[in-house]
Amino acid sequence: MKKRIITALLGIPAVFLIAWAGGIYWLGFVALIAIIGLYEFYRGIKTFGHQPMWVPGYLVMIIMFFTGSEWSNEALLIAVLLLTLTFMVLLYPRYHIIDLAASFFGAVYVGLFIGYIWKLALVPDHFRVIVFALLLTWASDTGAYFVGTWFGKHKMIPSLSPNKTWEGFIGGFMATILVALAGGFLSALSPFQSIMLGIIVGLAAPVGDLFASGVKRGLGIKDFGNLIPGHGGILDRVDSLMCVAPVVYFLILKGGV
């Protein structure tokens, strides 16, 4: 716990500073997260006995990262996929279909979802939006952790995450709604919009966490890495935010929030 607190006290101000700077600084920061995140994912695949397709995988990840932006290029994605299939045929039996599937999935999962963390900087008043998304995510994680620790008795999905409880889920869900309401008073959100945002994020954040837990359990690893003291790897830290970011992005961009 001490390591987690120290890391948070040092890391949170740094993240806020980069978010405030925005532009190329936020792009570079989030791109680095994606690069390390895919490395962690592929290392987990390799630990499980499969061969990740590194070069095609990173190319797909980069393309997915920019999906929906002015740099999006579907033709390039098709070209990379065809090249990947060619590599698999020529290098068989070194690479099998499961290697291709795992490599492609990891690239799409990391590139697409982390890409939306970057895209939060493309909306008007980007700093407020990024901070809001981070606070909502942290509210979900923190509320679930403390309520689950103090009152948790009923296991949620023990096959995926043995320590997650329904009490913790409710605590995180309610904390997210409260933060959404508080943020609504400081922005243009109506109470109804704030509650709806809190409900959707309150569901999306634990889904991201549980999905990552399921992937790790399937690969037989506890954490994706150990880069962040007390928190594990990059993917361990951003798994919830990866599902929250697209929700916030589309609600603000498409919903006029």
Image (cartoon, rainbow, N blue to C red):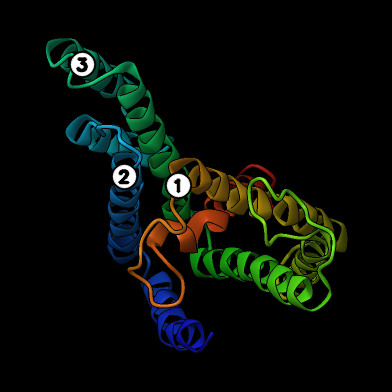
Looking at the image, is mark 2 or mark 3 earlier in the sequence? 2
Other-residue count near label 3 (Cα within 10 Å), few / some / many at <14 / 14–19 / ≥20: some
Looking at the image, is mark 2 or mark 1 earlier in the sequence? 2
Give above or below for 179 relative to 23: below
Q: Secondary structure at mark 1?
A: loop
Q: Secondary structure at mark 3?
A: helix
Q: State how far apart marks 3 and 1 are (Cα).
A: 25 Å
Q: State how far apart marks 2 and 3 are (Cα).
A: 20 Å
Give above or below for 142 relative to 173: below
Q: State how far apart marks 2 and 1 are (Cα).
A: 8 Å
Q: Is residue 91 left or right of residue 250?
A: left
Give above or below for 60 relative to 204: above
Q: Which residue is mark 3?
A: 88
Other-residue count near label 2 (Cα within 10 Å), few / some / many at <14 / 14–19 / ≥20: few
Label number found at residue 220: 1
Q: Quadrant of the C terminus?
A: bottom right
Residue displayed at 62% across by 70% down? 138
Query: Going by the picture, which residue comes out furthest to the right?
Result: 192
Give residue 72's quadrant in the image.
top left
Residue displayed at 64% across by 42% down? 254
Give the camera-side residue of 79 and 236: 236
Q: Nearer the viewer, mark 2 or mark 3?
A: 2
Q: Is residue 67 left or right of residue 200?
A: left
Q: Amino acid at mark 2?
A: Thr
Q: Amino acid at mark 1?
A: Gly
